[in-house]
Amino acid sequence: MSLPDSTAIPGSDVSVTAPLACVRRAGALTVGDLLRVQALRAPAAPAVTEGERTLSYATFNQRVNRCAHLLRVLGVAHGARVAILSENRTEYVELEFACAKIGAIACALNWRLADPELVHCIRLVSPALAVVSPRFEAALGRIDHGVARILSLGASYESGLSVAASTEPDCDIDPEDGLLVLYTSGTTGSPKGALISHRAEVARMHVAREEFALAPEDGFIAWPPMFHMASSDQMIACLCSGAHVFVVDGFDLPSILAIVARHRLWWLVVLPGTVDRFCAEIAAGNVTPKGIKRIGAMADLVPRQQIATITALLQAPYANTFGATETGLPPASAGLLPIVPA
C-alpha cells in the first residue's frame, strides 16, 4: 500500500505532496513523516491556532515544507543544528517540524538564562543558523555567540517562506537521527544539552496515545515555554496524532481560560505558582471547562490540597507523572489521581 503523490483540498489551491520515495514502513517513520501523514489524512482539520489565526493541517504542513527548504538555502544540512531563541509562536512550531523534515536538529534556547549561560548553550551545539524573534534580538546581539547566519522571525522569515518551494523535502532521515536539543541543568554546573532522537520522540508519542489517551479530536494549550518539554514534547505528540495545538505566549491566564471554555483538551499543564490562580478564576465562576481529560504539572511537585482543589474545579483527574528531559515521562508515570468530590 502506498500514499498518493498528492492530495488537493477541494476549493483550495493548497495541496499536500507525498513523494513515493518518502513512504516508509511503520517502524522507520520520523516526526516529519507523521506530520505529512496527518496532512494527508485530514487536510482541513485545525492544526495550530495562535490568537485568531488557525492553520489547517494542509496549510501548516505546507509552511513547514517551505521553512525546510528555506533552512537548506541558508546552509542547514542534514545533522546541522538550528538554535532558536524565541517566545512561543507559530513559527517556533514550524521550525521544529522543518528541522525534522531535513534531518537538522532544533536547539531550543532558554531565554531566561544569563548572557554567559546563553553563550555556553549556543556554542555547545555549534549551530549553522540561529533563529531569533524580535523580542530577543537585542539579547542575541549583545553576546559573542559565534553563529555566522541569523534569521529573524517576522518579515524576513515570511519573505523567505514566500519564495521557497512547498514540496516535501527528500526523506533520507534515520529514526535514530537527532531531532531536538532541550537544555537541562540537572543539579550542578552549566546547562547540558539533551539530544532527543526521532525514535525517542515517536516513542513518547506512542505513550501519550496509548497510556494517556491522546486522540485526534483533542486540543493542547502550549503555554509553557517551547524550550521546555512541557510544551515541545506534548506539541509534537499532538501534531503527529492529528490533534489541535493552541500556541499561547506564556501564562496568559485570560487566553488560556478562554480556550479551556471553548475546546475539549487532552492535557492542561498546571505548574506550581499557577495552580492557585487557576483555582481562583474558576471558583469565581468566570469559566466552565468544555472538557479536560487530564491535568498535570509534568515532574513538578504540587501540594495535595491544591491537587484536590483543582481536580474538583476542573472536573479532570490529575496525571501523576515524573520523568526527565532526556527520557520524557514514560519511565515514571503512575497513572491518574481521581477527581476529589466537591
Image (cartoon, rainbow, N blue to C red):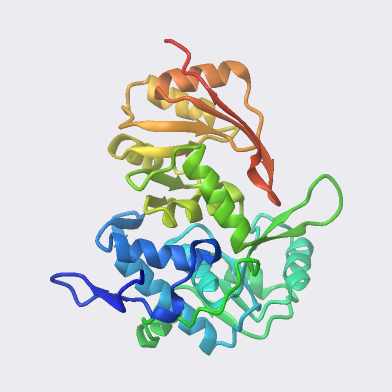
Residue furthest top as drawn: 342
- From the top left corner, tell me how far across and down residue 55 is, in percent: 31, 62
In the picture, the quarter occupied by the C terminus is: top left
194 or 277, which is in the foreground? 194
* Residue 68 visible (yes or no): yes
Front residue of 37/87: it is: 37
Residue occupying the point 58% across, 71% down: 137
Q: Position of residue 206 (x, y in %)?
A: 52, 48
- How far across and down, in percent of the image, does residue 108 sit? 62, 62
Query: Is residue 195 depicted above or below 156 in this figure?
Result: above
Q: Nearer the viewer, residue 3 or 322?
A: 3
- Give the residue displayed 38% in from the left and 64% down from the top: 37
Seen from this angle, which residue lies furthest right? 189
Q: In which image quadrant can residue 215 be found?
A: top left
Q: How many marks?
A: 0
Position of 269 with respect to 148 (left or right) is left
Say above or below: 142 vs 255: below
Residue occupying the point 30% across, 58% down: 54
Side of 48 where 195 appears, left or right:
right
Residue 239 quadrant: bottom left
Q: Residue furthest front?
A: 1
Residue 147, given in percent of the width and then of the height, sits at 69, 81
Foreground residue among 259 and 27: 27
Quarter holding the N terminus? bottom left
Instruction: Give the side of residue 81 with respect to residue 5, left or right.
Output: right
Task: Kindly give the residue lying farthest to the left in the view shown.
Answer: 11
**Relative vertical location of residue 271 with respect to residue 225 in this rendering, above or below:** above
Residue 226 in sight: no
- Residue visible at 40% across and 86% down? 164
Q: Quadrant of residue 77?
A: bottom right
